[in-house]
Amino acid sequence: MADLVYELNVEAARLARSAADAYEAKDAARPRFVAGTLGPTNRTASISPDVNDPGFRNINFDQLVTTYTEAVRGLIDGGADLLLVETIFDTLNAKAALFAIDQYFDEHGRRLPIMISGTITDASGRTLSGQTPEAFWNSVRHARPLTIGLNCALGAKLMRPYIEEISQVADTFVCAYPNAGLPNPLAPTGYDELPAQTAEYLLDFAKSGFINIAGGCCGTTPAHIRAIAQAMQGLTPRQVPQIEKKTRLSGLEPLNIGDDSLFVNVGERTNVTGSRGFAKLILAGNYAEAVSVARQQVESGAQVIDINMDEAMLDSKAAMTTFLSLIASEPDISRVPVMIDSSKWEVIEAGLKCVQGKAIVNSISMKEGVEPFTQQARLARRYGAAVVVMAFDEKGQADTYQRRIEIAKKAYDILVDEVGFPAEDIIIDPNIFAIATGIEDHNRYAIDFIEATRWIRQHLRHARVSGGLSNVSFSFRGNDPVREAIHTAFLYHAIKAGLTMAIVNAGQIGVYDEIPKELLERVEDIIFDRRPDAAERMVVFAETVKGKGRAAVEDLAWREAPVAERLTHALVKGITNWIVEDTEEMRQQIEAAGGRPIQVIEGPLMDGMNVVGDLFGAGKMFLPQVVKSARVMKQAVAHLVPYIEAEKARLGDLKPKGKIVLATVKGDVHDIGKNIVAVVLQCNNYEVVNLGVMVPWKQIAEVAEREKADIIGLSGLITPSLEEMAHNAREMQRAGMTIPLLVGGATTSRVHTAVKIAPHYAGPVVWVPDASRCVGVCSSLLSDDQRKGYVGDLAADYERIREQHAGKKGPELIPLAAARANALATDWKAYTPPKPEMLGIKILKNYDLAEIARQIDWGPFFQTW
């Protein structure tokens, strides 16, 4: 019936139009609208129908666009007032529908409102193609819909946490029209719920502020719709929230980058131009091994993976399509967004047609002029992608500070003012070029990039900045120690200036504080162009280690330090070579002094991880290094566990002291600290159920109830996790729970816990600053003798903190007119500036140096030092 798409749609829309018009004529005060529906089709563009061939698809993006275009034409010709893209189980199908709609609107000069509705297929809380609700929203929000929401699959009771999630992140109206419960072949309608039940659930949605529009899907009857309509009478619709402007990307999971977000690592190894090993795999057609390269990137901390297939001997479009289709079938890879990297627009476009999430285009520029630039930008927006904009125009690549900021501003203004491109989806690349080349014109390449980055972040509102890191050290190819030092120092200073993300090789980044002093001095000389002979001195120094690889600067003097210091060094540097023997030496040392094996974890190992945390927080260590540190920690703990278990068996201390459910909250993938907490608690005879990362409240609640947990512990590293913790506290209160709630992680604090989390839950809420405190906290909370006093003291402390916080006064504000009236009144026409005592240069001979020293302001010197 494919050839009848237009005819069926136009007649269906006309039928609906005539019915709506007839009823509106009877009751003109209530206008009726016709929504033309675009369903999901019976095929999936993101999923292979053949389990033996994960790269195969039985439908592609272009075919879907063609089909949806005919459907749109029929619905609009038939009289539809708006378009409803619904029951979305594969977001790539929906993006094809949205592409077809936008293209049709542009071609016909008429736009209708769009409603978008996804489908959560099961208790995983994801679409059939694997996306979370927020990732789904990030993928389709470029269409600027009238509403976003969910329908079908689940009944309202099971839909609740997912429609709540969408309502919290969507800056548009929210619509929910669930099924009448779950399918039941014995029920008259084939579904469980009676009209009053469905209406009651949707009434809860409305009263909770989740929705603006309610309705029913499968199994709902006219009686259901009537009951829902009656339940909604007199209620206040959800207020559309003001959502912070962020670069909202997605794979299967969201990645939101705001002004205060941590630096984003973009993995560079899936790039045929940047990795010989990867290029060999792709050229040989060994895609299975090539996919493993992508997996290793994500496991090593890449939050985005850059994919480039620009190789003269490749069919780049086919290679890009094949590789993206294969990684789409790998959830541990496709959970992160992709950066589609090519110098050929047709390759980029081929990639965009394979990605259900919100990707980054790398890149577009004004190299061929403004018109091609705007055309590509409009297409990128229609595909729902963010864009990297190279500082490049018809004159060439920008290689000075002034040219960088001029091109950046021109491109930004065109995108925002002419194309209507969201500013937060613009990522400027001001060009990282090689330094220390011996060419004088290249000496300021690094410092000009850093200063241009600073200017862009200060002047181009909401724009982000990116770059290809390995370019900066290109002059020292083959000299890994020098390249690593350059990358580390450059990245440290660029991030401080506002660099949002960079394409990096995690294996060539070190720890800033660990760069040898002499090497760091020479590296920063060339980065900041501090002296005329900086490049020459760097080249001479580099010759001392040239050709010897990393071993040339491997200093084993740390092996002579006390064992506790060796453990810290190994954790910071991610060195596993001696970790087992050092851990064992530390254990024997502690036990000889009458201590216990667990004290190795609670003492020196925790001390080392605290150093890692401090360096990471200061921007002197990056996520891939932290991941390596966690692996070292895991290996050390694994060595100690048998000794700890043996001690427990020897002492007869086998009865669990309590059961604790731990989880990293939804939206956060960081679990290093939480896993250390789990180990410490287990070693102290607490039973721990560790749920992992990205755990939604529904799962936490179900496990806590099933396991009869004594305590729930929530962890998070990123700022949005704080709001998720507060949300979980509210849900604990709504569920009538009373068990203690622990919160911890890098962004948490005692003040935030007291002011923003504890007020939402009547039970004890405790901030745990690090793993070393968790045992004492849990012991106090679960002790019949100590609990009452501990909780009472905690409540009094939190109340005092809240009072202090409430008592803080902001600056006293006055009206703008009054402020302007307070301006310094100066009659410049009548003012004559005083004449200096002398003009020109004054020479002071044999001046007292001690007197000069007393006049020096050392502040700027020490800040720079």
Image (cartoon, grey):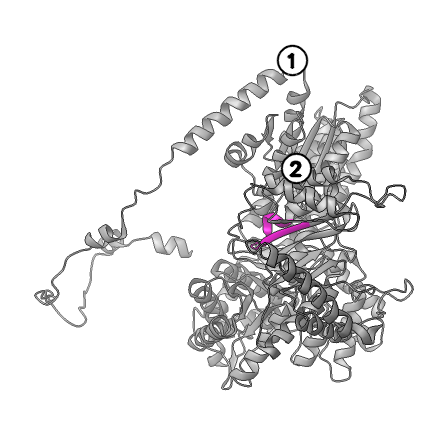
Position in image of residue 742 (x %, y %): 63, 32
Q: Amino acid at mark 2?
A: Leu
Q: Label 2: which residue?
A: 714
Residue at 77% x, 74% y: name it: 7
Residue 580, labelled with which disc?
A: none
Disc 1 secondary structure class: loop
User: Which badge, 1 or 2, is on the more N-terminal residue?
Assistant: 2
Q: Nearer the viewer, residue 834 or 10?
A: 10
* 843 with respect to 511 (left or right): left
- Magenta region: 166-176
Q: Is residue 232 above or below residue 424?
A: above
Label 1, label 2: how far apart the Cα atoms are: 25 Å
Q: Which residue is mark 1?
A: 785
Between 210 and 663, the residue placed more toward the observer is 210
On screen, residue 269 versus residue 436, left or right, reads right
The residue positioned 41% from the left and 33% from the top of the image is: 806
Mark 2 closeness class: few <14, some 14–19, many ≥20 residues within 10 Å: many
Q: Horizontal and vertical percent for residue 469?
A: 59, 68
Above or below 591: residue 838: below
The correct choice, above or below, for 182 with respect to 445 in the image is above
Say whether residue 172 is magenta: yes
The answer to whether residue 745 is seen in the rendering is no
